[in-house]
Image (cartoon, rainbow, N blue to C red):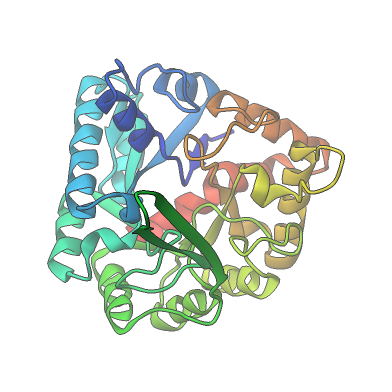
């Protein structure tokens, strides 16, 4: 195994929130899904660290993302003997040669920019090399796979919250969103279409020439959730040379509505087999969503990547194919885009 690359985790945001609540936290070793010690012992090469901002719960999403970026910088500085940032493709090999893990900074929620191009450039200057265009709410850039419209009001002294989820497959990128995607490709920031609406996926496809990613999305034909990609999307992403990251969230792996609890490891295998059948071996990577999801007992953290490797290998995936899934395919995208 060359190494492991995981295109998405929410570890930085999770640790930051714990620190704000008064806990002592460290990226080096913690009780969450991902830490440096487990990454090192499991054979990681690179981890994408997302700065996740739920904009509807933050009055100032821009301030929140800057705070997260500073926390990320501090954690890397405190652990510089183990990990170093990636700003360009060559940094990955340089870090590996120095015996260090690599960290690639991403932002999950394009709405933090408020549609301001200057803020996109600021994110790039801070080291952000991938941007998830939307999370689960509409923003200035476009519409998600579904959205949560929250309306709050006070009646006779009681606080009432109404939440409504609406399928939103037909609404794609806004004019500003199209401008952002073009500028991102120009400067070397990879568009991430996970969470984006179906129409938004095709907008990104039409606007770009280089590969893009769905950093943490599975196959909709295997698990019928709107967060997963259709077979046509998988084919189009593969044709573009892009990559999608196998997501470990149980709701995106299997329908749990039945009486029996699904075998989530078997479900991950079914997604992998289907994605490769539809799009070829070059399109599949990893995007665990660790520290942003409830613990998947079958794949509970960074220490469990070997379990997934063994499961795929037992299902006749070759060593060469596994190297591509666990590392090579994402490396190829980064070589072309960063």
Q: Position of residue 263 (x, y in %)?
A: 80, 37
Residue 283 x %, y %: 60, 60
Q: Is residue 314 above or below residue 129?
A: above
- Left or right of 122 in this view: 225: right
- Of residues 261 and 182, the one nearer the viewer is 261
Q: Residue furthest front?
A: 156
Q: Position of residue 231 (x, y in %)?
A: 69, 70
Q: Residue at x 54, y 35 (%)?
A: 2
Residue 23 percent across, percent down from the top left: 31, 17
Taking the image as shown, residue 107 lies to the left or right of residue 32, namely left
Going 45% across and 40% down the picture, which residue do you hit? 9
Identify which residue is drawn at 34% across, 49% down.
157
- Front residue of 61/82: it is 61
Does residue 177 appear to the left or right of 223 in the view shown?
left
Whether residue 23 is visible to the viewer of this picture, yes or no, is yes
Tally the marks: 0
* Vertical comparison of 23 with 89: above or below: above
Quadrant where the image shows the C terminus: bottom left
* Vertical placement of residue 321 versus 150, above or below: above
């Amino acid at each position: 195994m060359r190494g492991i690359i995981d295109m998405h985790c929410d570890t930085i945001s999770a640790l930051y929130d714990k620190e704000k609540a008064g806990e002592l936290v460290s990226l080096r070793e913690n009780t969450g899904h991902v830490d440096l010690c487990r990454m090192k012992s499991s054979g990681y090469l690179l981890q994408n660290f997302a700065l996740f901002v739920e904009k509807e719960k933050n009055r100032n999403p821009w301030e929140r993302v800057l705070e997260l970026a500073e926390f990320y910088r501090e954690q890397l500085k405190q652990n510089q003997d183990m990990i170093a940032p990636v700003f360009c493709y060559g940094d990955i090999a340089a870090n590996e040669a120095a015996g260090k893990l690599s960290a690639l900074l991403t932002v999950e929620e394009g709405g933090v920019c408020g549609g301001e191009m200057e803020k996109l450039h600021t994110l790039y200057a801070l080291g952000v090399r991938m941007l998830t265009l939307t999370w689960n709410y509409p923003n200035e850039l476009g519409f998600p796979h579904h959205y949560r419209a929250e309306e709050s009001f006070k009646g006779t002294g009681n606080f009432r919250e109404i939440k409504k989820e609406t399928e939103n497959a037909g609404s794609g990128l806004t004019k500003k969103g199209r401008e952002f995607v073009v500028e991102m490709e120009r400067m070397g920031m990879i568009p991430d279409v996970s969470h984006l609406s179906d129409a938004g996926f095709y907008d990104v496809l039409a606007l770009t020439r280089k590969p893009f990613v769905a950093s943490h999305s599975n196959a909709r034909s295997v698990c019928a959730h709107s967060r997963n990609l259709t077979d046509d999307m998988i084919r189009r992403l593969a044709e573009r040379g892009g990559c999608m990251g196998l997501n470990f969230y149980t709701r995106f792996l299997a329908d749990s509505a039945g009486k029996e609890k699904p075998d989530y490891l078997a479900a991950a295998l079914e997604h992998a087999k289907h994605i490769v059948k539809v799009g070829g071996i070059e399109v599949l990577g990893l995007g665990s969503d660790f520290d942003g999801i409830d613990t998947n007992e079958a794949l509970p953290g960074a220490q469990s990547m070997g379990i997934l490797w063994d499961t795929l290998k037992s299902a006749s995936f070759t060593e060469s194919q596994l190297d591509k899934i666990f590392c090579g395919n994402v490396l190829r995208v980064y070589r072309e885009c960063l």
